[in-house]
Amino acid sequence: VVDATAAPIASIVPISSWVGFEISLIQAELDKILASDSDPDIKTTGFTVFLETIKYRYYCIYMLMLMPLLIASGRDFGPMLIAERRTKVYGRTDGGPGAALNAEGEVLKSNNTPSEDTPCKWWNMVFPIVMLVVYIFYLLAYTGDDGSGSQSFVDKMQNADAYSALLWGTMAAALTAVGFYLIQDKHMDRIIFFNVKGYISRAKRGFASLKNKFRRTPDQDENTEGEEEVHARVLMSYSEAMTSFLLGMEKIFGAIVVLTLAWASGAIMSAVGLDRFFGEILKSDALDYRMLPTLSFIIAMIIAFATGTSWGTMTIMFPLVLVPSYEASGGDANIFYGVTAGILAGAVAGDHASPISDTTILASMASECTLLNHVKTQAPYALLVALWSVLVGTIPSGRGAYSSGIAALMGFVAMLFHVVFTAEFAINKTGRYDIFTEIYLRFAREKDELLQLKEDVKIAYETGEPVEMALKKSITHEDTKDVSMSKTVVIDRIGVTETNRSATAHECVPINEDEDGVDLESSVKDEQAPLDDDNKIQ
């Protein structure tokens, strides 16, 4: 969900850093077109062209339709359905086999999470985002104002310096967020705004600490430390804010390096004449120019998948394709916007399915799961939506069969069809998988685990609780033989191994036997009871 929604939203909402980058690339190619055609039938500013392309970005639009439908229906398909079933059927809370582990085999934790004593409040996320939107739109209007006083808001947006507005708006929002956190104090799981008494108290303690540097006794040290524990503290100090800022920059540093290399690749390709080579191909009589939106989408997707960078793909594709496509179509605005949108949407689609993508790596790090497991669950979404983007989006739209609005409606129908008829509930009566996984089971060799999971889904459906708990309760009602069998089933189905023993072993306790048989009262113990060396689960 994180990866499938983040990039499509960031690429089409006109207040993100993506947009500033995309607008700069579009504007560079528009300048070339305007040099040869002073009165084109298309918009002449990068920002307005960007706005025109939003309705043609079928991959992003369809993906943003599919995700809410899956979430609202409770259905899923492919590897994501299997992962969700493992969580719900077995009550896993440790991340399961897809959790990212460190060198010691422990689950990775982010270094940029709030401290345990910090109350998590919704307004601390919403307020900075609202201010970001306000700052960016204000700066867009400010940079687009020509001083005549007769401009409308739309005119100002069309003439705005989007790159500068996004740059300064983002920095202003970051500084505003820091200031907003500084006026909040935390104490006993509460947030206190403008804690004047706390400010005075901190000033007094600071002054006392400074004075004690010159003459400090052990008693004074102990009192100061004791007082510090009971006083309210600022929600996020200036030093903590700067540390968080640097940790965030560290995560995207690799993406910046890849982007810089992509810029260099794009410049090299233009210098050796690859753009002219593409131009000759696109203007060939053998190629129907109405297929250019579809070709640009597919080529951009392939390049993004191979290189692992959507921004790099845009940097490479725009100089090679945009101007030749405009010339090949005779200045057709529908084709020009479709090609531009095809490059932008194809870059996102290939980036989604690529295991070496910077955004894929960042999404797996943010979700604290392994990269390959993230790619395995993400790829089916990307391939499915990309297929329908071509079939009911770029092909009919490019050929003028129907408008982009009808294409969006057709995409919604296609996504709804998949959710209703090909996806399945995580917990259902028959344990049936989605149609794609069922086909896989017919031909797969190693399918015992999936078949066992299918049977356990039925138990979870009937009992209304995780399988482990249902089987564990049955121990107290069965005889000696049945108890032993139940214990074995629990161990086998949960799959206790060295990597996940901590999540399940403490819930499975040894069975004490005596000469008369099994002591049922001692067979179910407290979950935190330690295991004897002779009775450890192997």
Image (tube, grey):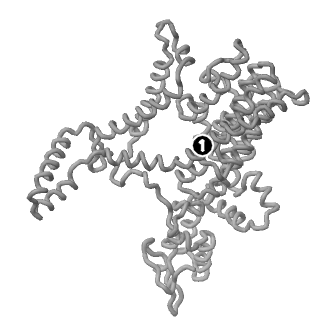
**Is residue 415 in view?**
no
Q: Which residue is mark 1?
A: 259
- Residue, x 64% and y 26% (percent of image)? 28
Question: Is 97 or 297 nearer to us in this picture?
Answer: 297
- Residue, x 65% and y 60% (percent of image)? 457
The answer to whether 182 is drawn above or below residue 475 in the figure is above
Position in image of residue 55 (x %, y %): 67, 26
Q: Dividing the image into 4 quarters, which one contains the C terminus?
A: bottom right
The answer to whether 147 is drawn above or below residue 179 in the figure is above
Residue 131, quarter of the rendered image = top left
The answer to whether 449 is drawn above or below residue 13 in the figure is below
Position in image of residue 38 (x %, y %): 70, 13
Q: Dividing the image into 4 quarters, which one contains the N terminus?
A: top right
The answer to whether 258 is drawn above or below residue 31 in the figure is below
**Is residue 445 in view?**
yes
Q: Amino acid at mark 1?
A: Leu
| Apparent side of residue 507 relative to residue 390 in the rendered image (left or right) | left
Question: Is 400 or 510 nearer to us in this picture?
Answer: 400
Question: Is 450 or 307 nearer to us in this picture?
Answer: 307
